[in-house]
Image (cartoon, helix red, strand yellow):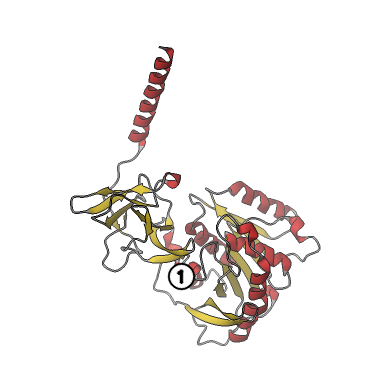
């Protein structure tokens, strides 16, 4: 009897809690619009003003369809089959602002959404969706002078091949004669050299900052950071030396020889997001004579002890999202400042380990470089 009463009491409490939670959940506003990343003339996926995402997949013979976004660790958003054979569903709550990778599971198989463009992440070309952000103006496409993003293939004797990089040159570079500082900006695990310009919109961030007179124009270089492939969960097996050689002994000299750069440590920076931050920290400490400005974006922190018997960089920038571990970033920044370093910490409010955090980080870091 007591056990029955106890179970009934728990059930009553749960139902009351569930009812309150349901009541507190705001009604979904039906102002959905196609995502900015959709393929031409494709209506779905859609997003609304609250940040909800809605999906429609045409799979009439399927028994189950779900989208990886929406329910976090609970397996994504389950879609429901409609009378016309399509599958539709809406995330149970708003998504974080900015860019998200996702995929579609149809009867257990993994596929991309045919309605949207694909972006390289998680070691594959994934579907992408953009949740409009309140501060999206800083990376918006505007009627301002634009720089140029070009692909280069540079020789890499250490890997016995030619490797690819993308180079952003500021507006006016082609017609001018001046020389520029360079930021070497690295992607995260599972991404490649396309990430910062495509998902990160680094070129548009730069164009807008330059047009507003907020930064000194500089070149950005993105290259592939995985010189020895490792699987997720085994990143400790990654060896930095091969990539360090590619970057510092092959790519940097090639860029200095083929672009109008100021080929000095004081006019060269390295930064990276996530795994790219790990690469940045290791290489900058191993090669303090190559880079003068350091940036870790959701990629760990520096400590004063890291620079024992090493020269101080001109700037240390560390950042993360407020849904990551912001206390560690803030504490590291304070401790570095107290030890006499020019250190800046930044926390992106309302975001996690995702590109909105890193877009905002680049926006905050860029004006601090090459002072």
- Residue nearest the observer in this picture, 192 or 268: 192
Image point 48% across, 65% down: which residue? 200
Specify the quadrant that holds the N terminus.
top left
Name the residue furthest right: 309
Question: Residue 359 vs residue 79: left or right?
Answer: right
Image point 67% across, 52% down: which residue? 332
Image point 46% across, 70% down: which residue? 204
- Residue nearest the observer in this picture, 211 or 166: 166
- Residue nearest the observer in this picture, 169 or 113: 113
Q: Position of residue 59 (x, y in %)?
A: 26, 57
Q: Name the residue under label 1.
A: 204
Q: Helix, strand, or loop for circle 1? A: helix
Name the residue furthest top: 1
Q: Is residue 53 above or below residue 191?
A: above
Q: Where is residue 275 in the image (x, y as percent from the top left)?
A: 59, 60
- Residue nearest the observer in this picture, 337 or 13: 13
């Amino acid at each position: 009897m007591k056990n029955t009463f106890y179970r009934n009491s728990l059930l009553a409490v749960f139902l009351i809690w569930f009812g309150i939670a349901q009541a507190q959940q705001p009604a979904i506003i039906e102002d959905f619009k196609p995502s900015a990343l959709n393929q031409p003339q494709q209506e779905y996926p859609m997003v609304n003003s609250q940040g909800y995402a809605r999906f429609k997949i045409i799979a009439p013979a399927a028994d189950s369809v779900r989208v990886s976004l929406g329910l976090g660790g609970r397996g994504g958003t389950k879609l429901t089959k409609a009378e016309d054979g399509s599958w539709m569903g809406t995330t149970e709550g708003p998504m974080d602002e900015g860019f998200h990778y996702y995929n579609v599971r149809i009867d257990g198989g993994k596929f991309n959404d045919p309605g949207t463009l694909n972006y390289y992440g998680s070691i594959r070309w994934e579907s992408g969706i953009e949740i409009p952000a309140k501060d999206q103006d800083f990376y918006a496409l505007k009627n301002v002078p634009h720089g140029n993003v070009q692909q280069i293939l540079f020789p890499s004797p250490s890997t016995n091949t030619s490797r690819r990089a993308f180079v952003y040159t500021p507006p006016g570079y082609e017609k001018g004669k001046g020389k520029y500082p360079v930021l070497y900006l690295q992607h995260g695990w599972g991404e490649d050299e396309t990430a910062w310009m495509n998902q990160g919109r680094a070129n548009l961030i730069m164009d807008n900052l330059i047009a507003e007179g907020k930064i000194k124009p500089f070149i950005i270089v993105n290259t592939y950071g995985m010189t020895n492939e490792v699987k997720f969960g085994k990143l400790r097996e990654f060896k930095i030396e091969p990539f360090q050689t590619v970057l510092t002994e092959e790519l940097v000299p090639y860029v200095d020889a083929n672009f109008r750069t100021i080929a000095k440590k004081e006019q060269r920076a390295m930064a990276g997001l996530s795994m790219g931050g790990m690469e940045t920290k290791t290489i900058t400490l191993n090669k303090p004579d190559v880079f003068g400005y350091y940036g870790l974006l959701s990629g760990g922190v520096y400590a004063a002890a890291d620079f024992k018997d090493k020269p101080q960089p001109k700037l240390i920038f560390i950042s993360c999202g407020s849904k990551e571990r912001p206390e560690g970033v803030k504490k590291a920044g304070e401790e570095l400042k107290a030890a006499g370093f020019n250190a800046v910490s930044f926390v992106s409010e309302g975001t996690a380990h995702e590109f909105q955090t890193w877009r905002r980080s680049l926006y905050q870091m860029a004006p601090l470089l090459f002072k």
